[in-house]
Image: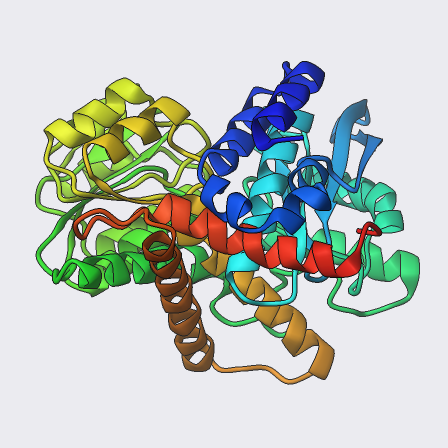
Amino acid sequence: MSISQAIEKLEAHYSHQYEFIQAVKEVALTIQPLYDAHPEYEEFKVFERLVEPDRIFNFRINWENDKGEVQVNRGWRVQFCNALGPYKGGLRFHPTVNQSVLKFLGFEQIFKNALTGLPIGGGKGGSDFDPKGKSDSEVRRFCYAFMRELYHYINKDMDVPAGDIGVGGREVSYMFAMYKNLTRESTGVITGKGVGFGGSLMRTEATGYGAVYFLENMLKAQDEAIEGKTVLVSGAGNVSLHAAEKCIALGAKVITVSDSQGTLHDKNGFDKPKLDWLKTQKAANKPLADYVTKFGSGKWLAGQKPWQFKADIAIPSATQNEVNEEEAKQLVDNGVKYIVEGANMPLTADAVDYVRDYRVHYAPGKAANAGGVAVSALEMSQNSVRQYKTFEQVDERLKVIMKDIHDSAAGASEQYGQTDNGYIDYMAGANMVGFKRVADALVAFGILN
């Protein structure tokens, strides 16, 4: 069965899972040259096997709110592929979470994790629980209840979850505490723990910093530098604010951040004190709009996105499919030459096609935002040997990993004829590198994985 036939079969089975189909097609459209060069992949039906998770666990979570009322949420863990190592991928708590979203994230995670060169497979999980507006005690009770269901399916050598949207250090700590209580084991079963009880320094910064390190390598490949460039960032969470922080530290001017309520624009750019204030504001779930009053500068654009401003670089870091084709046109019209995905699949398929057609240098999330899972894997290693690295040591390792991901993707683009007059197809390159690493392992194992 060809890749196109496999896609038709998948669409027939999962036509309602839009995000998942989108993620699979994005990989399928770019790996054909590699697939054709390796007939053993078709012999072992590698693509058909990879688009079906090894297993999906679906469970109910019962918990009580502060009024003593019983609440019911749904939870999932998608274990997609462990050919390269234990399943590894975050847990997302958000009302939009469903099986399609988690399958898309888990599928992306297979190749993202493969690109790091570290021994980790792909998985994802989460719940439709919304932590916003909940008290700390309600979040704690939900996390305990969630882990009571999840712990059956995870351990340090089988499946190692982490944080994601709605799951930060607080939630990870609560879940880790329940896991230890249930199993009487203190192991590296979940990453993103606090420093001092198993967590790695720099995990908080890793995804945002890693995206900017990837961007630096993209710019260098075009004989450019980040210093003096104007940057649009979407989102105001962990990835967004740390990407902005690293851009500013390297001499760029970041002029936007955003959230679900609108966009904050400061034409003069944010500096470190302003960014620190934004971190504190978001951590307290307070409005970004207060920035205008606090600093007497900038504009709050309710209900709007950041793509309307002139800039050199865009780092969409909020959520999937936040940039559609019309917004991609805005970016191109406003002079953006580099797009680096801080979130997972923030551009729609049409938006990706548009920016690639206009030769915008585009870094897909599975390559550009792999820094977070890379440092999570380093946390797993540190937990195993009970020895912990300094911030500087982890940062240096992250820089090397992101350079290796860039160089391997650029090399594959060149090797398979996707580089055109200096324009590097990072999407094709990253997909082929990640796919090949997993496919070679699956072929070596026969048909048992």
- Give the image quarter of residue 73: top right
Residue at 68% of width from left, 15% of height from top? Answer: 12
Where is residue 40? Give x, y as percent.
Answer: 66, 50
- Give the image quarter of residue 187: bottom right
Total marks in image: 0
Q: Would residue 161 be seen by someone viewing this image from the given angle? A: no
Of 213 and 168, nearer the camera is: 213
Where is residue 116? Give x, y as percent.
Answer: 51, 63
- Residue 39, compared with residue 188, is above or below; it is above
- Residue 440, compared with residue 91, is above or below; it is below
Which color scheme does this rendered protein use?
rainbow
Residue at 56% of width from left, 71% of height from top? Answer: 200
Where is residue 162? Give x, y as percent.
Answer: 64, 53
| Position of residue 15 in the picture relative to residue 367 (left or right) | right
Where is residue 333? Give x, y as percent.
Answer: 11, 27
Residue at 81% of width from left, 31% of height from top? Answer: 58
Q: Quarter of the image for the N terminus: give it.
A: top right
Q: Would residue 206 be seen by someone viewing this image from the given angle? A: yes
